[in-house]
Image (cartoon, helix red, strand yellow):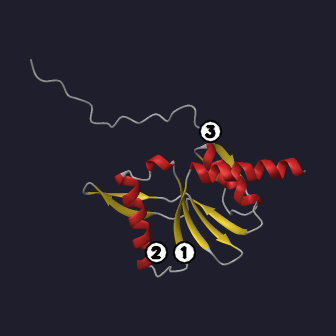
């Protein structure tokens, strides 16, 4: 009996159904934000409400990086421009994931990309659950003032 052919198609990983997804239209972001988590939505709402933020972009750049000898493409979550002139590339990430080798490879590649492109006025930051909790409190306080 000849061997059976195994499927060569990759299985698609299912996203957990508890993720909050949707589209947010922002007055400070030129394109609709197709957020894939409640944290990303919270960040977008915070950036919309913050008087210090002039504008921001969502998933607007792609950066090549290598992990385990394979090249991949990384898309940071946000690029934020502040009134002060500060420019920040932001990755929204759980604090316990910051030591993951893939996360470290993405951060290293982004910092290298900034240097190679002479974007010395940009910084790369992780906004973790603690930061996002602060944003939620800010938004709740602002909502309660109204």
Mark 2 or mark 1, which is nearer the start of the sequence? Answer: 2
Q: Measure how far apart labels 1 and 3 are at the Cα level.
A: 29 Å
Q: Residue furthest left?
A: 1
Q: Nearer the viewer, mark 1 or mark 3?
A: 1
The reply, left or right, for residue 45 in relation to residue 77 is right
Badge number at residue 17? none
SS at badge 1 = strand
Residue 136 image position (x, y, % from top left): 71, 48
Residue 124 image position (x, y, % from top left): 51, 67
The reply, left or right, for residue 141 in relation to residue 107 is right
Find disc 1 in the rendering and name its residue: 122
Verify CB contact (< 8 Å) between mark 2 and mark 3.
no
Image quadrant containing the N terminus: top left
- Who is closer to the viewer here, 90 or 35? 90
SS at badge 2 = helix
Verify CB contact (< 8 Å) between mark 1 and mark 2.
yes
Q: Measure how far apart labels 1 and 2 are at the Cα level.
A: 7 Å
In the displayed structure, 74 sits above or below 39; it is below
In the displayed structure, 89 sits above or below 140; it is below
SS at badge 3 = loop
Find disc 3 in the rendering and name its residue: 20
The image quarter containing residue 122 is bottom right
Residue 142 image position (x, y, % from top left): 82, 53
Q: Residue at x 23, y 29 (%)?
A: 6
Find disc 2 in the rendering and name its residue: 114
Q: Residue at x 62, y 41 (%)?
A: 21
Q: Residue at x 53, y 63 (%)?
A: 125
Mark 3, Cα crowd under 10 Å, few <14 / some 14-19 / many 20+, is few
Residue 73 image position (x, y, % from top left): 40, 58
Q: Residue at x 50, y 49 (%)?
A: 95
Verify CB contact (< 8 Å) between mark 1 and mark 3.
no
């Amino acid at each position: 009996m000849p061997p059976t052919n195994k499927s060569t198609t990759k299985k698609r990983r299912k996203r957990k159904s508890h993720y909050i997804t949707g589209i947010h239209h922002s007055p400070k972001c030129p394109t609709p934000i197709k957020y894939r988590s409640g944290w990303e939505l919270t960040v977008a709402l915070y950036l919309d409400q913050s008087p210090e933020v002039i504008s921001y972009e969502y998933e607007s750049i792609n950066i090549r990086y290598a992990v385990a000898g394979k090249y991949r493409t990384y898309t940071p979550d946000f690029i934020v421009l502040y009134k002060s002139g500060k420019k920040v590339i932001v990755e929204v990430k759980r604090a316990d994931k910051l030591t993951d080798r893939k996360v470290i490879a993405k951060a290293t590649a982004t910092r290298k990309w900034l240097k190679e492109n002479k974007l010395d006025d940009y910084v790369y930051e992780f906004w973790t659950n603690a930061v996002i909790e602060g944003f939620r409190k800010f938004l709740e306080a602002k909502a309660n003032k109204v």
